[in-house]
Image (tube, rainbow, N blue to C red):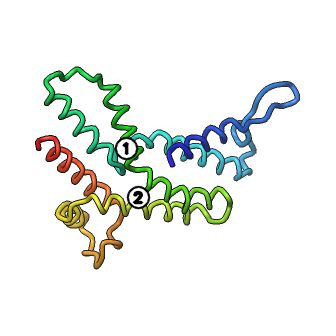
């Protein structure tokens, strides 16, 4: 999903035109009429795209198993007695590859049910986001401790949801992160 967003950004930025005098220009970027709302929309879209790309690493940490994996690998490295080996870059690379392996079924579902229909023009952006959110939420909820979820539902000061599917995603994410941290330290200590 993140790769698709990055490739879309590159395609958007790389889809510039070359004018007759040989200079390159990107459509929608540059001086435009004040009365032309399409130019403002393109600028806002570009801003949103760059914001999304800059937040992609944080999303990777927040909604995947990366946090658990990297903490366990770090604790195991220190338990071996040589805290410098393997180097941090190797540990992060291994953590990333293991995260890709663990999250592959979720990402395949997101690709099949949300990204491909959206790219084919079969669904709108809002529907694609909802379809992409569902498998990620399912993964996070399966890994989240009920006590952590209860804690964040209480902290959100919202009415108690009747079912797990009614818990807002902004409540699920911090509960998931807290559960991942607890589980990682338990695994490392054991």
Residue ranking furthest to the right? 20
Give the answer, above or below, for where 190 lies relative to 90.
Answer: below
In percent of the image, x 28 and y 79: which residue is there? 162
Return the residue nearer the eye: 44 or 8. 8
- In the picture of the structure, the residue carrying the numbered disc 2 is 136
Q: Is residue 174 left or right of residue 46?
A: left
Q: Is residue 165 left or right of residue 108?
A: left
* Image spot of residue 34 (x, y percent): 71, 47
Give the answer, above or below, for where 21 lies relative to 12.
Answer: above
Q: Of marks 1 and 2, which one's residue comes earlier in the chain?
A: 1
In which quadrant will I find the C terminus? top left
Kindly state the secondary structure of the residue where label 2 is placed.
Answer: helix
In percent of the image, x 24 and y 50: which residue is there? 180
Kindly state the secondary structure of the residue where label 1 is placed.
Answer: helix
* Image spot of residue 120 (x, y percent): 68, 59
Is residue 171 at least partly visible in the picture?
no
Residue ranking furthest to the bottom? 162
In percent of the image, x 36 and y 51: which residue is there? 63
- In the picture of the structure, the residue carrying the numbered disc 1 is 99
Return the residue nearer the eye: 6 or 94. 94
Return the residue nearer the eye: 157 or 136. 136
Is residue 183 at least partly visible in the picture?
yes
* Image spot of residue 55 (x, y percent): 44, 43
**Residue density around tag 2, few if under 14, some if 14–19, many if 20 or more, within 10 Å:** some
* Image spot of residue 145 (x, y percent): 21, 61
Give the answer, above or below, for where 136 lies relative to 92.
Answer: below
**Residue density around tag 1, few if under 14, some if 14–19, many if 20 or more, within 10 Å:** many
Q: Is residue 4 left or right of residue 161?
A: right
């Amino acid at each position: 999903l993140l790769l698709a967003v990055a490739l879309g950004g590159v395609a958007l930025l790389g889809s510039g035109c070359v004018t007759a005098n040989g200079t390159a220009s990107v459509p929608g970027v540059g001086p435009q009429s004040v009365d032309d709302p399409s130019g403002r929309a393109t600028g806002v879209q570009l801003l949103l795209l760059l914001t999304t790309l800059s937040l992609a690493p944080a999303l990777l940490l927040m909604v995947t198993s990366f946090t658990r994996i990297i903490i366990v690998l770090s604790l195991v490295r220190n338990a071996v007695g040589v805290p410098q080996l393997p180097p941090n870059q190797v540990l992060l690379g291994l953590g990333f590859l293991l995260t890709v392996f663990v999250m592959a079924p979720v990402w395949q579902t997101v690709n099949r049910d949300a990204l491909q229909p959206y790219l084919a023009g079969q669904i709108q952006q809002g529907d694609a986001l909802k379809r992409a959110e569902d498998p990620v939420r399912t993964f996070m909820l399966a890994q989240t401790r009920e006590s952590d979820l209860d804690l964040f539902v209480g902290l959100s000061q919202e009415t108690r949801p009747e079912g797990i599917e009614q818990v807002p995603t902004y409540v699920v994410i911090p509960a998931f992160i807290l559960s991942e941290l607890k589980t990682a330290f338990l695994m490392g200590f054991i």
